[in-house]
Image (spheres, rainbow, N blue to C red):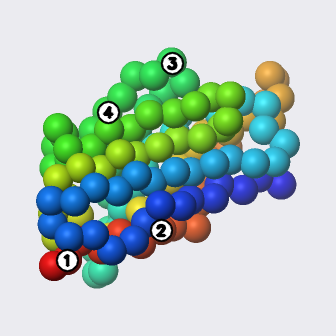
Amino acid sequence: QVQLVESGGGLVQPGGSLRLSCAGSGSIFSILGMGWYRQAPGKQRDLVATITSGGSTNYADSVKGRFTISRDNAKNTVYLQMNSLEPEDTAIYYCNAQIRFSWSTPTSGYWGQGTQVTVSS
């Protein structure tokens, strides 16, 4: 059984910073792509940032220059450093990981439970 556990969300004032973490546990052989998505009330879940196992990154235009995604492969963990936060960043943030359970099996996608980020004065 695999779990992705997120942490680091909370309430922050506009212009502030937060750092989200997502740690994978269980019978993991390797993790390929990892990413962060967010869903605001009444809206669809949107991509925020992704990172490959080799460290290549991709960001949504709305967060470029403010958010940084990184990962620690030894810890099966992905991070999202969020700076200059805006009220429009308020959402539930979910991590996603493409996990392989052995060298011969295809990857399977998993989601974390989500962590609330609220940006408000």
Numbered label attached to residue 54: 3
Q: Quadrant of residue 101?
A: top right
Q: How busy is the neighbourhood of tag 3: few (under 14 within 10 Å), some, or many (20 plus)?
A: few
Q: Residue at x 65, y 55 (%)?
A: 4
Q: Find the distance from the CA under tag 2 to the CA under tag 1.
A: 16 Å
Q: Find the distance from the CA under tag 3 to the CA under tag 1.
A: 35 Å
Q: Quadrant of residue 38?
A: bottom left
Which dot, 2 or 1, sits closer to the camera?
Answer: 1
Is disc 3 in contact with disc 4, using a CB cutoff of under 8 Å?
no
Which dot, 2 or 3, sits closer to the camera?
Answer: 2
Position of residue 65 relative to residue 19, above or below, is above
Callout count: 4
- Report the amino acid beneath label 1: Ser
- Report the amino acid beneath label 4: Asn
Q: Residue at x 47, y 43 (%)?
A: 79
Residue 6 visible in the displayed image: yes
Q: Position of residue 28 (x, y in %)?
A: 78, 38
First reached walking from the N terminus: tag 2 or tag 4? 4
Residue located beneath label 2 in the image: 115
Residue located beneath label 1 in the image: 120
Name the outermost residue toward the top: 54
Q: Quadrant of residue 67?
A: top left
Residue located beneath label 4 in the image: 58
Q: Find the distance from the CA under tag 2 to the CA under tag 4.
A: 21 Å
